[in-house]
Image (cartoon, grey):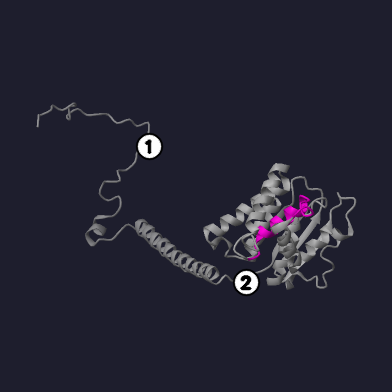
């Protein structure tokens, strides 16, 4: 290599400023330990304390990691059982659900799903009228009748329907304490369907996609224009020509939502063919009897 001359003269004494704080060199001998401690391999007491704290923290983290792994295995076991057997897992504690809906457009699917929930769980359902509403018919005011046992601790679900002036469809409060709101009849129906079947999301992609598609079509039937409604009814009639129910050969939330949309869009009277047969099947099902009292 080429020899380079020094850029500075090492023999020149450089005056150190005394206007700043002076610090001892961390590399100098005797800072971390004494000569005697060096010879016997003893660390400085402060360093020893720091190492002890670090070891204690690492042990706690290791214990937490073991607990998390144990919980994750339990969750996977429960999910696999629910998906494999198709049996809803038991509800722990009380699930409190509050739905605010307009009496001018009651969410009929809510009452069908409430009946289905009652077949699997202990459900208490009550209704109230908000002070902002002047008149509510007796059918809506007493839709659930009277509940003989008002002790909430004896139930797994408590469904409260409040009739009030709601502009953009029904609103459900999943947790009244945290004010977590789910807006729209379709979203509420999806949430209740998951309560009915905790393995709802574990279904095959094809089944879940078809259910979601029919729920969206139901909202189009309820809120779309005449051309869109006619297209949905044609699609509905063609599908029901191959099966008694819309998805999977059995009653699902897709049928519940579509039945509700047929009632709200006033398409029931003009229904013919496969759609009429399907409507009669729904009307004969026990879960639809409460909702039928609101449209008759």
Residues packed near mark 1 inside 10 Å, few (<14), some (14 to 19) or many (20 plus): few
Using the numbered discs, state the Cα–Cα distance from disc 1 to disc 2 in whole angstroms.
Answer: 68 Å
For residue 158, say whether it is visible. no
Q: Which of the two discs, 1 and 2, labels the residue nearer the N terminus?
A: 1
Q: Which residue is mark 1?
A: 21
For residue 225, the mark is none
Residue 210 or 67: which is nearer the viewer? 210
Q: Quadrant of residue 251?
A: bottom right
Q: Quadrant of residue 24?
A: top left
Residue 29 or 5: which is nearer the viewer? 5
Residue lying at 63% horizontally and 66% vertically, measured from the top left: 250
Residue 36 within the magenta-colored segment of the rendering: no
Residue lying at 67% horizontally and 49% vertically, measured from the top left: 232
Image quarter of the N terminus: top left
- Residue 135 sits above or below residue 4 on the image: below
Residue 231 or 259: which is nearer the viewer? 231
Q: Are marks 1 and 2 in contact (CB under 8 Å)?
A: no
- Residue 271 sits above or below residue 115 on the image: above
Is residue 270 toward the left or the right of residue 242 in the image? right
Q: Position of residue 171 (x, y in %)?
A: 73, 52
Q: Which residue is situated farthest in the front direction here?
A: 273
**Secondary structure at numbered mark 1:** loop
Is residue 5 toward the left or the right of residue 155 in the image? left
Residue 256 within the magenta-colored segment of the rendering: yes
Image quarter of the C terminus: bottom right
**Secondary structure at numbered mark 2:** loop
Is residue 191 toward the left or the right of residue 4 in the image? right
Q: Which residue is mark 2?
A: 90
Count of numbered badges drawn on the protein = 2
Give the extent of the magenta segment.
Answer: 250-271
């Amino acid at each position: 290599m080429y020899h380079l001359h020094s850029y500075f003269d090492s023999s020149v004494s450089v005056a150190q400023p005394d206007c700043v704080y002076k610090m001892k060199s961390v590399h100098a001998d005797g800072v971390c330990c004494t000569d005697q401690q060096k010879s016997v391999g003893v660390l400085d007491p402060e360093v020893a304390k720091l190492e002890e704290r670090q070891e204690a923290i690492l042990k706690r983290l290791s214990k937490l990691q073991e607990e998390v792994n144990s919980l994750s295995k339990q969750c996977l076991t429960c999910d696999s059982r629910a998906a494999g057997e198709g049996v809803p897992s038991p509800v722990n504690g009380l699930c409190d659900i509050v739905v605010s809906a307009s009496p001018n457009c009651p969410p009929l699917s809510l009452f069908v799903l409430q009946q289905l929930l009652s077949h699997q769980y202990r459900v208490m359902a009550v209704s109230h009228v908000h002070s902002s509403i002047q008149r509510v018919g007796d059918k809506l005011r007493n839709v659930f009748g009277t509940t003989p046992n008002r002790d909430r601790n004896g139930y797994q679900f408590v469904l409260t329907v409040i009739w009030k002036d709601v502009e953009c469809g029904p609103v459900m409060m999943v947790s009244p304490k945290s004010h977590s709101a789910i807006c729209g009849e379709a979203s509420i129906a999806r949430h209740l369907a998951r309560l009915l079947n905790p393995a709802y999301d574990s279904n095959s992609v094809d089944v879940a996609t078809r259910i979601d598609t029919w729920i969206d079509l139901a909202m189009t039937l309820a809120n779309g224009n005449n051309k869109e409604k006619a297209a949905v009814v044609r699609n509905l009639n063609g599908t029901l020509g191959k099966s008694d129910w819309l998805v999977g050969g059995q009653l699902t939330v897709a049928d519940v939502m579509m039945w509700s949309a047929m009632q709200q869009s006033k398409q029931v009277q003009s229904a013919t063919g496969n759609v009429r047969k399907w409507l009669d099947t729904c009307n004969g099902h026990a879960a639809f009897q409460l909702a039928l009292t609101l449209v008759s």
